[in-house]
Amino acid sequence: MAKVLVVTSGKGGVGKTTSTAALGAALARSGQNVVVVDFDVGLRNLDLVMGAERRVVFDLINVVQGDARLAQALIRDKRCETLSILPASQTRDKDALTSEGVAKVIDELREKFDWIICDSPAGIERGAQLAMYHADAAVIVTNPEVSSVRDSDRIIGLLDSKTARAERGEKIDKHLLLTRYDPARAARKEMLSVEDVLEILSIPLVGIVPESEDVLKASNIGSPVTLASPDSLPARAYQEAARRLTGEELEVSVPIEKRGLFEWLFKRRGA
Amino acid sequence: MSHPQPSSQQTETAPALRIRARGRSFLALVLSPEAPLTDWLNGLDHQIARSGSLFSGKPIILDLDLLAEDTPDLDGFQSALVARGLRIVGIEGGDRSWPAVAQWDWPAPLDGGKAAGPVELPDASVDSAPHQASPPLPGKTLIVDETVRSGQRIQNLEGDVVILGSVSSGAEIVSAGSIHVYGALRGRAIAGITEHSGARIFAQKMEAELLAIDGFYTTADELEASSFGNAAQALLINDQITLRAL
């Protein structure tokens, strides 16, 4: 049965699009039929991160408004054939999304795919609420800093009240994905610890993605990090997170700083 | 507590009527004026203005121990107090033989009083309501089973609010009665909005951004650091939100 997953956050710049691409690719590599949908109408980033920007002809808005068929707008990934992308429009604004249109598209996608992963715009406005409305599960992307955590808390409240499932009195599965985690800075108490974040948000942790150059590199070459460098630490974190999303029970390991203090001091002085 | 004289008609055969007596104690305020008396009276006026009805109708005992025979303005002092509505039931200290107080109206001395310690004079214009054993508020208790998230607002205008989860920073709980939080209270808690000054705010982990009871509020900055992060209750004492460990 198809599962609709929304990747969301309150604050921008926490890594939603990167995480959508990485999780989508990881799930697709395990043989499941996956589509990633860019709901960030007006900005359109997911196609870039997926390396599909030159192949965009029709987009989500065209499908929602009935100007194109879904099959015309879906772009199949070149590296992984079970992975598709439905891009957002950059020329239209977010008011072009209608709730009826979105419902129709999601229903159609449910027939074709195992996973529909919606990359939500940041914030709490209509675009974000449309992205989350049909979700069965949510990944809340949070950085270990207070403003990100508080905004995530707000989003969790919306997920519990403003989704189709909540309106039917059902619960939506919520998963916390902690991104841009820097073990060295966490050890120096320059960012919130994993425990602090979990204590405040009190939803299950699906993964901790360490801050890494690999993520940036992958973004810039237009490939999800789980495809670009599958053996890197962040890619492994995303792969494990994807397995947890499919119901596997794996313990989440907290990345720790391996370098010793002296080495760190030495390196700082050299820099 | 009158003492009726037995009627002379009462015959020796009829049993004497048993009269009833009950005790009632009042707390008399003891005022100890200091020289110079005009300044002290100014201070008194100020206090009366701030504490409204605290002095009206209350028995006052004047303690003259701090004054001397030749204190200026002493002769008109009593009438100055009476003019302010104070009811002087006793005068202690000093001496009736002082010429300045010869014209005073000296009430009969009272005895048997027990010292009750200093009485805290309230600082706001509203009278502080009794704190202990405030009557429970009728109405329904609202029970919330989960965590109240940032941006959410829970409101019960009839009774108490019970939160089984935490209250996140940026969330707001409004209650006519008390607020009970079994997790961490990090948001705003506004209790006793229907002028229910006996309302309290309880939290397993007190980290509130703002606490308010019956319109009096305090922010996280002003909370005592010792209670912060621990199980605590907030209650109103002399119109001040006070935190106490649970």
Image (tube, coloured by chain):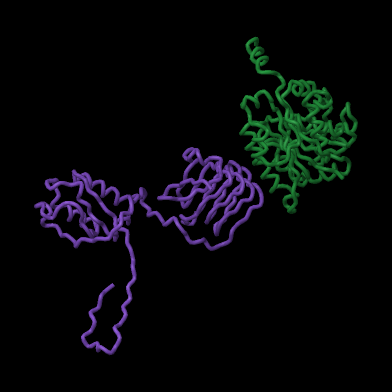
Chain colours: A green, B purple
| Residue B6, x across and y down, in percent | 24, 82
Q: Which residue is at the far front? A: B13
Residue at 90 percent of width and 31 percent of height: A81
| Residue B173, x across and y down, in percent | 57, 49
- Name the residue nearer the viewer: B235 or B49: B235
| Residue B246, x across and y down, in percent | 53, 48
- Quadrant of the snapshot with the N terminus of chain B: bottom left
In the picture, residue B3 is in which quadrant?
Answer: bottom left
How many circles with numbers are drawn on the protein? 0
Figure check: B82 above or below A212:
below
Residue at 82 percent of width and 27 percent of height: A226
| Residue A100, x across and y down, in percent | 77, 47
Q: Seen in the image, is A139 located left or right of residue B26?
A: right
Asked if residue A52 shows in the view, the reply is: no
Figure check: B32 above or below A142:
below
- Name the residue nearer the viewer: A254 or A140: A254
Q: Which residue is at the far top? A: A270
Residue at 64 percent of width and 35 percent of height: A196
In the picture, residue A154 is in which quadrant?
Answer: top right
In the picture, residue A41 is in which quadrant?
Answer: top right
Asked if residue B218 shows in the view, the reply is: yes
Q: Seen in the image, is B91 located left or right of residue A93?
A: left
Q: Seen in the image, is A45 located left or right of residue B56?
A: right
